[in-house]
Structure formats: C-alpha cells, structure tokens
Image (tube, rainbow, N blue to C red):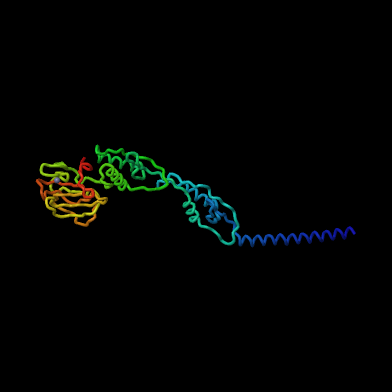
C-alpha cells in the first residue's frame, strides 16, 4: 500500500515537472517572440511634448549636454526650461528617431542668451558688435574723426540678449555715425553730412544789402569733390541761371539740398545717389566771383539756414 502511494506520488511529481517544463519553454518562447516584435526604446519627452524614441539614452544625453555647453558665436549660455525626460517603452517594430532630429527639437525649444557689445550714444544703444575690441575701435575712430564736434557721450555696454543682432565693424560704425548725424544735424528726420571735407565760409545765409542770400558759401579750389549730404534722388542736374551748374537732391520727408556754381556735374536727373557719394566738383559757374560751393537746404520748399544744421 505504502509502496503504491510512493509510486503514485513519484508519478505525479514527474508529471508536474514535465508540465512546468512545458510552461517554462512556452514563457521563454512567447518572451522571445515579444522581444522580436517589441523593442525596448526610450521615449524622449521635453516640455510636455513627445520628441521621439531612441535606443541609446546615454548618447543623446551626452549630445544634449554638449549642446548646452556650446560657447561659440557669442553664446553666453543656453537654458532649457526643464531636463528632457526618458521613459523605457516596448514598441512594436523598429521605432527610432535620429539624434539630429531630437537635438534639433531640443534646440528649437531652448533659450539662447548671447553676449554682445553695444555702442551707445548718451546711454542709448545704437549698434551691436562681436567683441569689446570692435566696440572700442568704433568708439575711438568716431571720437578721433569728430573731435570737439562730438556733443554726445559715446559709450560701450556689455549686453546679454536673446536676439543676436550683430553688425560688421563697418556697418556698426556707419549706423552710429548716422545716429550722431541724426541727433546733431538733421532736418525732419533726415541726417545731413557735410558736402565738403574742408573749406572757408565766405558768405552766410541771410539778408544782404543787395537782397537775400539763400544759402551758405564755402570756398574751395575748382575741382574739389562735392559729396551728397545724404542718399536721395537727383531731381535737377544742369545749368540754372545765377546758380550756374546746379545739382538738387531730394532726400525724402520734404528735404532737399542744392549744390550750386559747380565746375563739373557727375550725376544726372533721376539718378539715385548714396550718402556722401561724390556728385560734382567745386567751380565758379553762374553768378560767382570765385570758386565756391553755394549750399542750400530746403524743407517743403522753405529755405533754411544751413548753419542751423551743418558748419554750425
Ligand atoms: Zn551763395
């Protein structure tokens, strides 16, 4: 009796072992099939948005860290509003987002703070450059060129900004120059530059015993270049009675400049001219007693005293 029981127990034990084996093999097989179909990947989430799936979590973390620590192109620092989140997932089939794509998505949502240098006039920033050296070069050149004529305070400010609006040395200098000119010598929002680099004022604007002098006379030898007070359209270029050879430029906003008694005209009617472009040469044509430039400034047809703006 005991023997039969033992025998039967042994039989059941062996049978259960067999069943267990079958179950184990089944589980392994099913797992293998699942792993063949479903791949482990990391879901990358950033600022509540699913950016994609990636196998190599360490590598993408390293790439993002490298990006955050970028120090080129005036980047002071890069701020992510939060760390990207990684979640292990089993996804059917090959789902993998490229690292470039992920990095691009992170870049788009990051805040880049740039460090630039501003050149300021009376505390107001007017132009932005790469380095303090460039800013100093511009400030020094302007101070040197304008000397005592510079009535404004020129300074340099270190700026941290999200907008990278850097200008080349040349453009930045020209912008600052234009701003100075606008503040110191402008008519109705049009900056005016000197048409002659030097010269002697021989007759001022205003009443004369023989009538009214409508401009400013500056004596210079025949052939001296005359430069446009600013950009604009040539509305007249030719002979004009007592003016002799005359150029009229319309600068917009109702502002016109007249250049009279020229020996040579280098522009023609309808032409667009640049700021400080050479437009004519000093002469003594028309009613004139010697080579000089007769300069007029007009606003909406009204004749202004040039010395309120230039050669003050
Ligand atoms: Zn005159």
Could you tell me which residue is drawn at 16 percent across and 52 percent down?
A: 246
**Front-most of 253 and 222?**
253
Could you tell me which residue is drawn at 25 percent across and 43 percent down?
A: 185
Residue 150: percent from left, percent from top: 26, 39
Above or below residue 108? Residue 160 is above
Q: Which quadrant is home to the N terminus?
A: bottom right
Left or right: 4, with 146 as reference point = right
Label total for image: 0
**Front-most of 92 and 172?**
172
**Front-most of 33 and 200?**
200
Above or below residue 26? Residue 212 is above
Residue 131: percent from left, percent from top: 36, 43
Quarter where residue 96 is shown: bottom right
Residue 162: percent from left, percent from top: 42, 46
Left or right: 117, with 196 as reference point = right
Q: Which quadrant is home to the C terminus?
A: top left
Could you tell me which residue is drawn at 32 percent across and 39 percent down?
A: 122
Residue 19: percent from left, percent from top: 75, 61
Quarter where residue 157 is shown: top left
Farthest residue toward the right? 1
């Amino acid at each position: 009796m005991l023997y039969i029981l033992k025998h039967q127990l042994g039989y059941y034990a062996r049978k259960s072992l067999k069943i267990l084996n079958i179950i184990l093999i089944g589980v392994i097989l099913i797992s293998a099939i699942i792993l063949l179909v479903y791949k482990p990947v990391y879901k990358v989430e950033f600022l509540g948005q699913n950016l994609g799936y990636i196998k190599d979590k360490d590598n993408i973390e390293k790439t993002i860290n490298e990006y955050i620590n970028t120090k080129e192109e005036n980047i002071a620092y890069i701020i992510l509003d939060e760390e990207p989140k990684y979640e292990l997932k089993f996804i059917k089939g090959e789902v993998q987002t490229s690292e470039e794509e992920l990095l691009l998505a992170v870049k788009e949502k990051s805040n880049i703070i740039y460090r630039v240098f501003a050149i300021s006039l009376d505390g107001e920033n007017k132009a932005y450059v790469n380095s303090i050296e460039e800013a100093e070069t511009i400030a020094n050149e302007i101070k040197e060129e304008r000397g005592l004529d510079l009535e404004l305070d020129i300074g340099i400010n270190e700026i941290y900004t999200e907008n990278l609006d850097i200008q080349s040395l040349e453009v930045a200098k020209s912008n600052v120059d234009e701003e100075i000119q606008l503040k110191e010598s402008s008519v109705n929002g049009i900056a005016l530059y000197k048409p002659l680099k030097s010269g002697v004022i021989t007759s001022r604007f205003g009443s004369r015993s023989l009538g009214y002098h409508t401009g400013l006379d500056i004596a210079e030898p025949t052939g001296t270049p005359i430069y446009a007070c600013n950009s604009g359209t040539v509305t007249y270029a030719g002979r004009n009675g007592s003016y002799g050879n005359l150029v009229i430029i319309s600068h917009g906003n109702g502002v016109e400049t007249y250049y009279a008694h020229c020996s040579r005209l280098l522009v023609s009617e309808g032409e667009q001219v640049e700021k400080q472009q050479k437009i004519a040469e000093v002469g003594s044509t028309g009613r004139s007693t010697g080579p000089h430039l007769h300069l007029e400034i007009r606003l909406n047809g009204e004749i202004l005293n040039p010395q309120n703006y230039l050669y003050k």
